[in-house]
Amino acid sequence: MKTLITNIKALLQTEKEEARNKVSGKNMASLPVIEDAFLYIEEGLIKDFGSMKDFASGPLATLAGNPDVEKIDAEGRMVMPAFCDSHTHIVYAGSREIEYIDKIRGLSYEEIAKKGGGILNSAKRLQEASEEELIEQAMGRLEEIKMLGTGAVEIKSGYGLTTESELKMLRVIKKLKELSPLTIKSTFLGAHAVPAEYKKNQEEYVKLVIEEMIPMVAGEGLADYIDVFCDRGFFTQEETDRILMAGVKHGLQPKLHANELDYSGGIQVGVKYNALSVDHLEFTGEEEIKALKASDTMPTLLPGAAFFLELEFPPARKMIDSGLPLAMASDYNPGSSPSGNMQLIMSLGCIKMKMIPEEVIHAVTLNGAYAMGVDEELGSIAHGKKANLIITKPISSYAFLPYAYGSDKVEKVIIEGKIQ
């Protein structure tokens, strides 16, 4: 299949010369753009792109009259890479709006968890649901986020909390990889919370994760990554260290939930194990920034969760100004961030964390791709990368993308060269 997009008002996040795997510090304020552009797709990949002036005088000009080439006139519209959402929990059974009401009435996230809500509530529901029910619900969510512009998504387990149910979740994610056109990565998060029956003996649950779950997950090849919720009230720095070590021994690269509720030491443990990303990071100080600067780990912010839980937002401005790269993801889940709308995440980055439009675009495209290990094939407009693209509605500038926070700015989504 061949597709030619012409008269693009602005082609965003282009890499004509030197390929980048991420964008850091002050470079996040600069966005590569080609105005009045074209883009040519062949066999699901980006074959060529450039200015319309170059197109008119170049060898591809004959494509305009080729009946075998699908043509899209994008006049007044912008084209950019589809979003890479590197942190979600979208395999779950049912919603948790009752807890939402508890939150409105003043209960904290931890208080809701203590009364049987939170992750343990989702775990109970998931354990009772069939694989078929979970697949059907998750496919609906994948379709929703795809049409809002997401082309790649990482999905975590962690609502099973028993060996059987964790494996069930990961098998569901494996099936979603087959059914959905999106690029999907899977993460084993058995250490998401401590089940009620282990509350007085957390060490036994840690052993279960290390000695039984990890070997079985790795043995079946069900996960790309391993994750731990290292934070106050969940898993300690020492427990996280042991779980990640076991995961690495079984070939699972770490990612990490860290420093959402307090200074947990999670960022430092993630860096120690060369984690692909450390996520949340509401509590990030000088020591954490120093550790991240000396690493290849991508700091990933989840402003949807901070917004929904009314937490203090991560110090994005301080992190970028110190020279760090930043990714942003939705944390789509039923309890703390029930939305996978990456357009809203961009707006929260600007409104609540004082990031500029160029920075948030980097954070949800190329840096998001890096945070889920797909930067070589997604996240930017580059020769040979997958044609996962967004064509916007007619908009005045790319700053309109985060500015119009309540509007859907996406007109068309292209996944591997196919209009969805």
Image: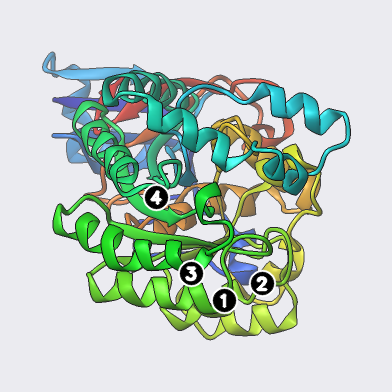
> Where does label 2 land, which residue?
264
Q: Quadrant of residue 119?
A: top right
- The amino acid on which the numbered mark 4 sits, given as a three-letter code, is Ser
Which labelled disc corresponds to residue 237? Answer: 1
Asked which secondary structure carries label 3, the reply is helix
Q: CA distance from mark 1 to mark 3?
A: 13 Å
Q: Residue furthest right?
A: 106
Q: Which residue is mark 4?
A: 380
From mark 2 to mark 3, how far is it between C-alphas? 18 Å
In this picture, residue 112 sits left or right of residue 136: right
Q: Nearer the viewer, mark 1 or mark 3?
A: 3
Q: Which mark is residue 203?
A: 3
| Residue shown at the point (63%, 54%) measured from the top left | 359
Q: Sequence order check: which comes first, mark 1 or mark 2?
A: 1
Can residue 230 be seen? yes
Q: Amino acid at mark 1?
A: Gln
**What secondary structure is marked by label 4?**
loop
Q: Position of residue 280 (x, y in %)?
A: 62, 57
The crowd level at tag 3 (other Cα within 10 Å; few <14, some 14-19, many 20+) is few
